[in-house]
Amino acid sequence: MFYPRILTVQDISCVGQCSLTVALPILSACGIETAVLPSAVLSTHTAGFSGYTFRDLTEDMPAVSAHWEKQGLTFDALYTGYLGSIRQVDEVLAIIDRNLARDGRVIVDPAMADNGKLYPGFDSVFVSRMARLCGRADYVVPNITEAAMLTGLPYRTEYDRAYIDALIAGLLSLGCRGVILTGVSYEAGTTGVVVYENGEYAYYAHVKLENSCHGTGDIYSAAFVGALVRGKSAYDAAVIAADYTVLCIRTTAEVENHWYGACFEPVLSHLITALNA
Ligand code: PXL
């Protein structure tokens, strides 16, 4: 039986429905053995909460990776999300060299910014180190803000295909093989995702909902990675992840006062159904 093992490296935000507390259940639901390397533990995520705790686990990362190597453990894919420091990015680069299976794939969600702004705690030095990690990726999964920062292009809220093409060209010039660019909207009322691979551009548009939720980028990438590792093409995986994320946002709108994350759990069965179609 095909039973891949993936490693995901990102923080645990104890409350907040993002990063590992989203990636682990989603990847497990996709039927993939999921190993985790928590890069930090925070009491909550950093968007909208104040006074959160932050326990940096960077020091532990090299020893964990060395132990896996000693045990002969390798991973069929490595998926990174929010990384809390430059040193953590460097540790992930070392993990690619040490712990990835020979033909293992690397998927990088450079989770560091949205709506034209970096998340708290990040600066331009971090962005350039993240660009280096993106250069080692088979697929990068940025939103438009992250793509603009990684490529040094201006962030725009109104744009045409030429701007998107320039972002993609800039991302490819970092060294990655494929690009999944999220939140691309060419007309009011719809948004979507661009998939660029092997010289081919594809666009999947879907409804743009009124409400937006924190953490949907993490839900999207985890579902994309799950579908990809399950054997779907990058485009099919991008579509499955988009439809699932829209459903999560719709579901969240039905819950009163749920401001800090998206309700992804009640609709996990839809993701599983889509994967088996
Ligand atoms: O959703 C990305 C994310 C992950 N982890 C932490 C965050 C954020 C976004 O703000 O603060 C700790």
Image: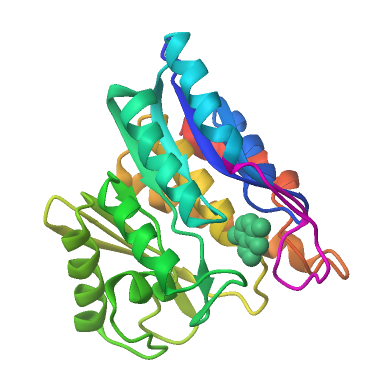
Report x, y in % for residue 118: 52, 75
Residue 141 placement: quadrant: bottom left
Report x, y in % for residue 67: 51, 17
Closer to us: 26 or 150: 150
| Viewer can see residue 32 | no
Was residue 83 drawn as part of the magenta stretch in this picture? no
Report x, y in % for residue 69: 43, 16
Which residue is found at the position 44% from the left and 49% from the top? 89
> Does residue 95 sit above or below 196 in this rendering?
above
Which residue is found at the position 32% from the left and 60% from the top? 131
Q: Which residues are magenta?
A: 41-58
Q: How is the image coloured?
A: rainbow
Residue 57 placement: quadrant: top right
Was residue 55 drawn as part of the magenta stretch in this picture? yes
| Viewer can see residue 109 | yes
Which residue is found at the position 46% from the left and 34% from the top? 277
The quarter of the rendering in which ligand 1 is drawn is bottom right
> Does residue 231 sit above or below 111 in this rendering?
above
Which residue is found at the position 48% from the left and 82% from the top? 116
Closer to us: 77 or 152: 152
